[in-house]
Image: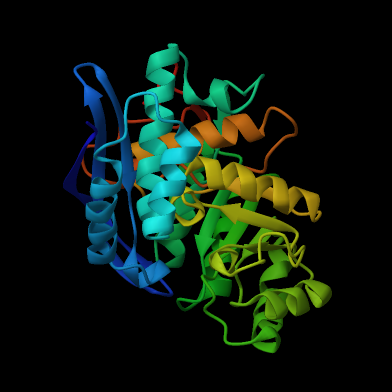
Amino acid sequence: MTRLEVIPRRLLLRSPLRTSWGDMREREVLDVRLEWGEGDFGLGEAAPLEPYDRVPLAAVVAALQAYEAVLRDAGPDAGHAELLAACAAERELPHALAAIDLALWDRAGRRSGRPVAQLLAAGAAESVAVNATIGAEDRAGAAADAAAAVSAGFECVKVKVGIGDDGGRVAAVRAAIGPDVAIRVDANGAWSNAHESLVNLRALALVGLEYAEEPVHGIDALRAVRAASPVPIAMDETAAEPGAVASGATDAVCLKVGRCGGLTGLMRDARAARAAGSEVYVASAFDGPLGVAAGVHAAAALGATRPLPPCGLATLGLFEGLEDVLPPIGGMIAVPERPGLL
């Protein structure tokens, strides 16, 4: 008999984070434990963020409760794909499926005595390059945070835009870090159409940008922006739309564990995006430790075949008490060496 346990966990931000979709001061995630018997278990995580992805936590809790009934009679030898398909047939909610998928991968790693990255791809990287997120809303604070990130070894910083004084803050960051460090801006779809996006991007492009993430929502709008933009464009939230990942509408696609339905879905989507000519990288939606660990394993596996742009996985340090969990050192996060995810 399979036992599914769901444990809510509240994470407090060390400082509030302002984005175009709202201010965030805390984060609630769901830790999941799948157990078949003593010592035979796997750990996963569901981390919807309703203001960002429009997925209510209550809907994920309900889906996991439904999965418990589906999985209850599954024997210890039931296959990963079989169990995941059974849950999806009951209720196809990616964030809930991600928790089950992560737990199954974690269990597989524990049983094999290997880190999950090595199960995902032969020759998985031992560390993953990451960007620093600059959350300060004022020019001086953003410049100071960016300079500190570069001193710590980061080679890419990400600045939230679409929240006021974008040009001033991005210019202050560039002045603080010099010409050789990459700057990525993230609008979270703050601009209403392609025209508005291009007006803003042409102004921001003067400082030199690596990518502009999700300047506007929608496949067609992103394709139109990319066609005229002086800045390479990355897809983020739009990747949830059917066919978006494989559309080739943007230069890059930002992949997230929860949105993809877990590691299995993330690796599938990465193959589709690359086949369409887009680069891929992995980011956290301010996930908890298991979600970020899964992202690190995925990025390490994807890095086995070609280099990735810096990934947005250096987010655990934004939370109280998690500064030492998967810490970035010299702009890199080491892949956990223990069997399983973390």
Where's the C terminus, which quadrant?
top left
Q: Position of residue 338 (x, y in %)?
A: 40, 16
Query: Taking 80 as reference, is 281 above or below it?
Result: below
Instruction: Choose between 110 and 9: the one closer to the eye.
Output: 110
Residue at 23 percent across and 61 percent down: it is: 62
Image coords of residue 23 (percent x, y):
31, 70
Percent x, y of residue 336: 44, 22
Q: Which scheme is used to colour this image of the protein?
A: rainbow
Quadrant position of the N terminus in the picture: top left
Residue depicted at x 51% and y 53%? 260
Q: Is residue 216 left or right of residue 1?
A: right
User: Toward which corner of the image does residue 153 lie, by quadrant?
Assistant: top right
Q: Is residue 291 visible?
A: yes
Q: Position of residue 10 (x, y in %)?
A: 18, 50
Q: Tell me the quarter of the picture where residue 21 sits.
A: bottom left
Residue 286 visible in the picture: no
